[in-house]
Image (spheres, helix red, strand yellow):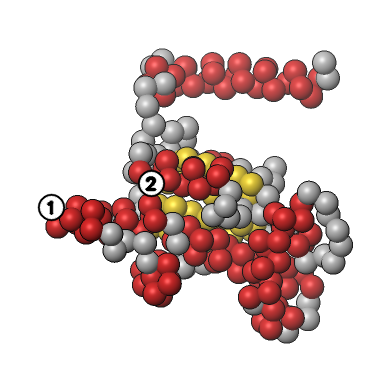
């Protein structure tokens, strides 16, 4: 096997030794259960790892990653993760995090056939279509890509808020809150896009209100 592959197991051995030396019960406690406050939905890009950029420890962040941090309600993977995190793990915050220099976003703005990637990137092309006037007015190509990264995060946050499990639990418990972030690879900093969750929820409920069922409202009054 290649040396680059074998080094992973050596790194794991050192990590285990380090954790046990700090706390002999670390893995015993880790194996019991998880109670993360955060669901992080990010890009699969190898440069943007959730726990490292957040400074989080094992057990603190529930993570889902895919190309360009897309939340497509027809994608069983992302929707299952969100529902499990909201209904069973009871996360308090859902974070959608994009990053500048995202290859998926750049590919979505490239007029070419990308094969199996086409239906996935169509989600981002739809974001481009919704905000075409603003994006086309940005002459600098790099800044245009950066802005689409931000707008993609914004639209994916809306897709999260559309989900019934998110709306229902928020009515019952005033959690979770949905946040939009961008990770700047050039500086290492997280940028909070300051998504107004309550206003966004109120605005979209005119069309996507999934909380008027009797059982939800009866639970609210108990």
The label number, if any, that marks residue 173 in the structure image:
none
**Which residue is denoted by mark 2 in the rendering?**
86
Placement of 14 over or under 112, stated as above or below: above
The x and y percentages for residue 52 are 56, 41
**Residue under the image location 46 percent in, 68 percent down:** 195
CB of mark 2 within 8 Å of CB of mark 1? no
Of residues 158 and 187, the one nearer the viewer is 158
Q: Nearer the viewer, residue 201 or 119?
A: 119
Q: Quadrant of the N terminus?
A: top right
Q: Is residue 173 left or right of residue 18?
A: left
x, y percent for residue 178: 43, 59
Q: In terms of sequence position, does the residue under pointer 2 or pointer 1 come before the other?
A: 2
Label 2 packing within 10 angstroms: few (<14), some (14-19), many (20+): many
- For residue 8, side relative to residue 159 (left or right): right
Helix, strand or loop at label 2? It is helix
Using the rendered image of the protein, determine whether residue 146 is visible from the camera's viewpoint: no
Which one is closest to the eye, mark 2 or mark 1? 1
Q: Which residue is mark 1?
A: 222
Task: Say which quarter of the image contains residue 140.
Answer: bottom right
Q: Is residue 212 above or below residue 78?
A: below
Q: Say if residue 5 shows up in the picture.
A: yes
- Residue found at the far front of this picture: 214
């Amino acid at each position: 096997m290649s040396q680059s592959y074998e080094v992973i197991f050596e790194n794991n051995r050192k990590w285990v030794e380090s954790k046990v030396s700090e706390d002999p019960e670390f893995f015993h406690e880790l194996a019991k259960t998880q109670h993360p406050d955060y669901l992080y939905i990010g890009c699969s890009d190898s440069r943007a790892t959730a726990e490292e950029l957040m400074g989080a420890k094992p057990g603190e962040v529930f993570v889902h990653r895919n190309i360009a941090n897309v939340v497509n309600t027809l994608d069983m993977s992302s929707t299952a993760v969100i529902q499990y995190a909201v209904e069973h793990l009871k996360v308090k915050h859902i974070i959608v995090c994009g990053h500048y220099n995202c290859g998926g976003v750049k590919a979505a703005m490239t007029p070419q056939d990308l094969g199996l990637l086409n239906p996935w990137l169509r989600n981002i092309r739809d974001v481009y279509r919704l905000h075409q006037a603003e994006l086309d007015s940005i002459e600098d190509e790099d800044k245009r890509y950066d802005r689409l990264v931000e707008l993609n995060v914004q639209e994916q946050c809306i897709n999260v808020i559309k989900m019934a499990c998110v709306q229902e639990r928020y009515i019952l418990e005033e959690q979770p809150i949905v946040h939009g972030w961008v990770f700047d690879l050039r500086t290492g900093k997280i940028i909070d896009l300051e998504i107004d969750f309550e206003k966004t929820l109120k605005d979209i409920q005119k069309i996507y209100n999934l909380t008027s069922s009797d059982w939800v409202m009866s639970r609210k009054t108990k």
